[in-house]
Image (cartoon, rainbow, N blue to C red):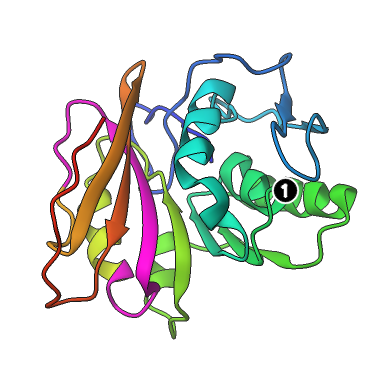
Amino acid sequence: MTRRRSPSRPSRHSRAPRRRDGNRGRGQLRIIGGEYRRRLLPVIDLPGLRPTPDRVRETLFNWLGPGLAGARVLDLFAGTGALGLEALSRGAHDAILVELDARASRALEDNLATLGITHARVVNADVMRFLDAEPTPHSLVFLDPPFRQDLAAACCAALEGGWLSDDASIYLETESTLAPEVPANWILHREVRAGDSTGRLYRRRPTGEDSPTEDAC
């Protein structure tokens, strides 16, 4: 997943830039754990396109731990695919990576081919339109919508339309100034701040099930 800062006339699909922080070299994505650990993949030269920083990915995947094995992953606003590819490297069963930009989508397909990954696919589509399609439940979702375009709440609500397994984990990244609106059955598990963004990991409980509140740290 990758952040691009919204341009002066933002497209609803543009990504906000993420600072380079712990990534090796300009234009490269490093897989940091699992089967493809230390593999370097090219990052297409698009304005603001940067992999999620290594330290943020390391923190997130430490949170996810062994529960990642066998996960069905949905990576929305995938960008470089840093999170989806990392999940596949660490044992996810399969993944769908959704990205609107055609060039970024082709680069994702090329990187999957380079790694020899056949249990993932790239969907070149508008995320909200994709979520309007017939859903299949996923156990792990990465959601990193562009900043200041009011997409986070709508995407979270759409995911509750059949895209989530009963005990799904959802990683949501937004600008730090935003208090995201999420479904009542999403329980905040952990959060981390990096630069002008905050990442939050939620654990889902089935609608109507009483859930204990988890402390964020």
Q: Quadrant of residue 210?
A: bottom left
- Give me the residue at 36% from left, 15% from top: 195
Left or right: where does residue 109 sit relative to residue 153?
right
Horizontal side of 141 relative to 197 (left or right) equals: right
Question: Which residue occupies 68% across, 56% down?
Answer: 91
**Is residue 208 placed above or below 45 in the rendered structure?**
below
Instruction: Please say if 41 is above or below 162.
Output: above
Residue 211 among those drawn in magenta: no
Q: Which residues lie in the magenta part?
A: 159-180
CA neighbours of label 1 inside 10 A, class few (<14), some (14 to 19), many (20+):
many
Badge 1 marks a residue whose secondary structure is: helix
Instruction: Choose top left, top right, bottom left or bottom right for residue 209.
Output: bottom left
Residue 100 visible in this rendered orientation of the protein: no
Residue 100 in the image: above or below residue 45: below
Number of marks? 1
Residue 170 sits inside the magenta stretch? yes
Nearer to me, 93 or 136:
93
* Residue 212, quarter of picture: bottom left
Nearer-the-camera pick, 144 or 204: 204
What residue do we see at 62% from left, 63% from top? 95
Name the foreground residue: 208 vs 47: 208
Would residue 61 be seen by someone viewing this image from the given angle?
Answer: yes
Task: Name the spot of residue 94 as percent of width and height, x first.
Answer: 66, 66
Q: Position of residue 33 (x, y in %)?
A: 70, 36
Residue 133 horizontal/vertical position (percent): 43, 81
The residue type indicated by label 1 comes to Ser
**Residue marked by disc 1:** 89
Quarter of the picture holding the C terminus: top left
Query: What residue do we see at 23% from left, 26% from top?
Result: 176
